[in-house]
Image (cartoon, rainbow, N blue to C red):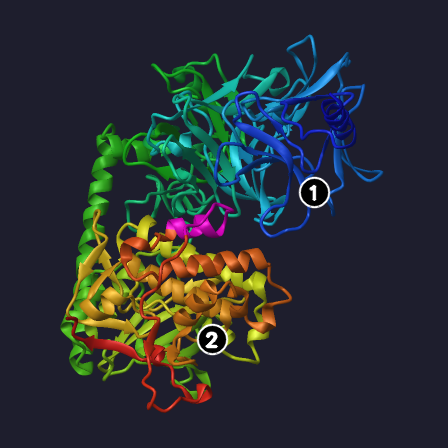
Amino acid sequence: MGIISFMIMIMIISYIIVPPILASNSINVSESLSDGETLISAGGKFELGFFSPGNSVRRYLGIWYKQMPIQKVVWVANRVNPINNTLGILTLTTSGNLMLRQNDSLVWSTTTQKQAQKPMAELLDSGNLVIRNQDETDYLWQSFDYPCDTILPGMKLGWDLRNDLERRITSWKSPDDPSPGDLSWGLVLHNYPEFYLMNRTEKYCRLGPWNGLQFSGLSDRKQNSIYDFKYVANNDLNYVSNKDEMFYSFTLKNSSAFVSATIYQTNISIYVWEENNTNWLLTESTPLNSCESYGICGPYASCSTTKSPACQCLRGFIPKSTQQWALRDWSQGCVRNISLSCNNQQMDVDDELMKYVGLKVPDTTHTLLYENVDLELCRTMCLNNCSCTAFTNSDISGKGSGCVMWFGDLIDIRQFDTGGQDLYIRIARVVTEASNGRNKSVITIAATTAAAIFGMLLFCSYIIYKVRWRIADKSKIDDNIERHLEDLDLPLFDLQTITSATNNFSLNNKIGQGGFGSVYKGKLADGQEIAVKRLSTNSGQGITEFLTEVKLIAKLQHRNLVKLLGCCVGRQEKFLVYEYMANGSLDSFIFDKITDKLLEWPQRFEIIFGVARGLVYLHQDSRLRIIHRDLKASNVLLDHKLNPKISDFGMARSFGGDQIEGNTHRVVGTYGYMAPEYAIGGQFSIKSDVFSFGVLLLEIICGNKNSALYHGNETLNLVGYAWRVWKEGKALELIESRIKESCVVSEVLRCIHVSLLCVQQYPEDRPTMTSVIQMLGSDMELVEPKAPGFCQRKVSSDEESPNQNEISSNDELTITSLNGR
C-alpha cells in the first residue's frame, strides 16, 4: 500500500509541475497556450499552434492542416510581428479578446466589439478560429474575417459593409517570411464591383465582374466535381451605400476532399487533396496566360489566345499607332475609325450600338448599374447619354436582366472562342449600316470607294512588286526567303537603314558573337536603340533557321521573351532586328568574377522566375507549343532593369495541338545543356528544355559553367558535383561566395532541389515548367531527386589528372549537325 500511495503522490505532483500538452479544441479565460502546445479541431482536420516557416527561426502563431504529411499553413496571427524565441503564450481575456505575448510584450491581439460573457476561443473543423460566449453560437470574433494568403471553403472574400470590413488575401514575402508580399486579391467596390489581383498598387490581373453565372473573365474555365464557386451581393445593387455584404466564396461538393486557394508571388492557385493522394494537386491557376494580364491590348482592343497577333482592334476601331502596332506594341490600343455624332455636331447621322459577342467585359471602374432595368431600356439610356460608350446585361443567367453602362475608354477586353458574354459598344451609325447592310446608298458609296482603293492597291502592289523584283535581281536575294517574308506581318527594314543604324557595322558597335554570326548595337533615326543580328554566310544556322526564328518569334509576345522588331535581307545577307537589351546576356554577369557581384541573390531569384515564366509561355500558353532546344545563359538577355528575356529561336521547333515531343536526325544545341535522350537519340520534348533550365539554374546559383571538375578519381561536371554534395548534405557549398550574404538560404536550397529534379536522367522524372514555378514559389514538399543524367565519368589511374583551372568547358560547343543514333 505504501508504494501505491507514493506513486499516486508523485503523479499529483507531476501534474501540478508539468501540466499535460493541450489536446483540446478550445481555451477558456483560465487557460493559455504556450509554444509546444496546440489546439486540434474537433474532427481533427486543423491544428493551431506555434511554428517556424521554412528555414526561419522566428516563431508564429498559425493554423495548418492536421492530417497532412506536408505542413500547409493557412492562417497566421502575427504575420507582421514574429516572436524571436519559444516564449510566446496565447491567452484569452475576460473581455473576449485573444492576447499573444512574448515575455511582457504584446505581439498580437484581437478586438471584439460585442459584449463578452464567459468567452471561449475555439478552433473549428472549417479551419476558422472563433471567439464566442459559451452559451451562444454567434461569434464575437473569427479568423475568417482576417484571411492571410489562403481562402478555405466557406470563407468569404470581399466586404462586410455593415462593419466596414474588407476581407482580402495577400501573398507571403517568401516561404520563410509570412509578412505581406506584393500580390493581393480583393474586391474593388465600383458601381459594378469586381475582383482584382494587385501588384502593390498596380492592376495585375482582373477576373471580370460576376455576371450571374461566373466571373466574366473566367468563361474558359471548366467546372469540376470537387468544389463550387458562388458570388453573393445582398440587397439593392443600385447604390453601394445600401449593400450589406458582398463576397466570393466556394463550397465543397466532395466532403472528403481538402481544397484551398492560395495567393503566391505570381498567381493564385487552387489546390486539392483527395483521399489516397500523396501531395497537393493543382487544379486551377490565375493568371493562366498572357491574355489575363491586365490591359495588355490597350483600349478598344481584345486579346485572344487563339489568334495571331493576340491583340485585335474591335470592329469599328483601328490601331492608334500603326507603327507601334506593327511592332507588336499594343499598349496604346485602338481608336474609332469614324467619330461619334455626339462629339461632332456637324454630322447628320446618329450613333448606334454594335453587338460584340463572346467577350470578357471591360474594366468596370467607370460604370453605372441598374438592376431593375431591362436590356431595351438600357440601350435607350445609353444612346441618350453621349458619355455612355457601352452597355450590357449585368446578369446573363436565364434570359438576362439588369443594366450596366460604361463611360470612358473600354480597357482589358478578352475574346473567347466559346462562352463569354455580349457587349454593345457605341459607334457611328455609318459603321453599323455598312456592317449590317441597312443603308444601300452607304453600301454603294463604300463599295465604290473600296473598288477604287482596291484598284490603287493593285497598282501600288504592281509597282512595289516590280521595284522589289529589280532590287532582288540586283542583290541576288533568294526568292524563297523573299516569298516567306512577304507572308509575315512583320516590318521589313531596308539595308541602308540597318547599315546607318550600326555605323556600317562598326567594330565599336559589336556587342556579341556566336556560331550564327555577330550582333551589333544600333540606333534608328527616331532614336530607338536596336540590336541587329547579322547571320554569317557560312553559319550552320542558314535559311531554315533564319525563317524559323522570324516565323516563331514574330508570333510570340511575352515580357520574358525578347521582342523581334523586324528583319532585313540584302546582298545575300540576312539580318534580324531586336529590341536592345542594355545589360547584355546573363553569362556576362554570372561567369565574370568582376560583374557577378552586381547580381545579388534577389536579382538572381527574379531572373530564375522570369526565365521559367518565359518557358511556361512557350510550352503551354502560346498558340503553338514551342521547344527552344538551345536554352543557355548566353541566350538569356537582361534589360536595363535586369528583367530576363529568352532569345535566339533559330533552333526552336513548334508543335500544334497536344504534341509535346519529336525526333530528329539533326541534333542542334549546346553540349552541357542538352538532355541525354536528345544528345544521344535525337528525341526532344518540352522536358528537353526543362533539363536545360535545370543546368542554367545551377549555374546561376554557383556562378560556374557546367564544365568538368576534377574530384577524386572522377571527372564531374557541375551537375555531377551538385548531385554529390546534395547526397552528402553539403548543398550549401554550391552557393556562389559573392551572394552568400544576400541569399535566403531556404530559397537557394529549394532552387538546388528543383534544379536536380529538372536534370533527371529520364524525361518522365522531370517536372513541367508550370510545376517548376509552383515549386519555386511555394513551400510545397518536393520529391527526392534521383541520380541526374550526364553527371560523371570514371578516370583511369594512369590518366593524367587535369588542372581544374585549365579545363575547357564543352558546354560552349554549339552542335548543329550531330546525327542522333
Residue at the spot 59% in from the left edge and 44% down from the top edge? 172
Circle 1 Cα neighbour tier, 10 Å, few/some/many (<14 / 14–19 / ≥20): some
Q: Residue furthest right?
A: 104
Q: Secondary structure at mark 1?
A: loop
Task: Tell me the quadrant of the picture where the N terminus can be found.
Answer: top right
Residue at the spot 31% in from the left edge and 54% down from the top edge? 765
Q: Is residue 265 visible?
A: yes
Residue 496 falls in image quadrant: bottom left
Vertical placement of residue 701 versus 404, above or below: below
- The percent position of residue 721, horizontal first and vertical second, equals 43, 71
The range drawn in magenta is 770-783
Circle 2 Cα neighbour tier, 10 Å, few/some/many (<14 / 14–19 / ≥20): some
Q: In the image, what residue type sits under mark 2? A: Asn
- The percent position of residue 649, horizontal first and vertical second, equals 30, 66
- Pointer 1 or 2: first along the chain: 1
Q: CA distance from mark 1 to mark 2?
A: 37 Å
Q: Which residue is mark 2?
A: 704
Task: Tell me the quadrant of the picture where the C terminus can be found.
Answer: bottom left
Q: Secondary structure at mark 2?
A: loop
Residue at the spot 64% in from the left edge and 18% down from the top edge? 241
Q: Which residue is mark 1?
A: 80
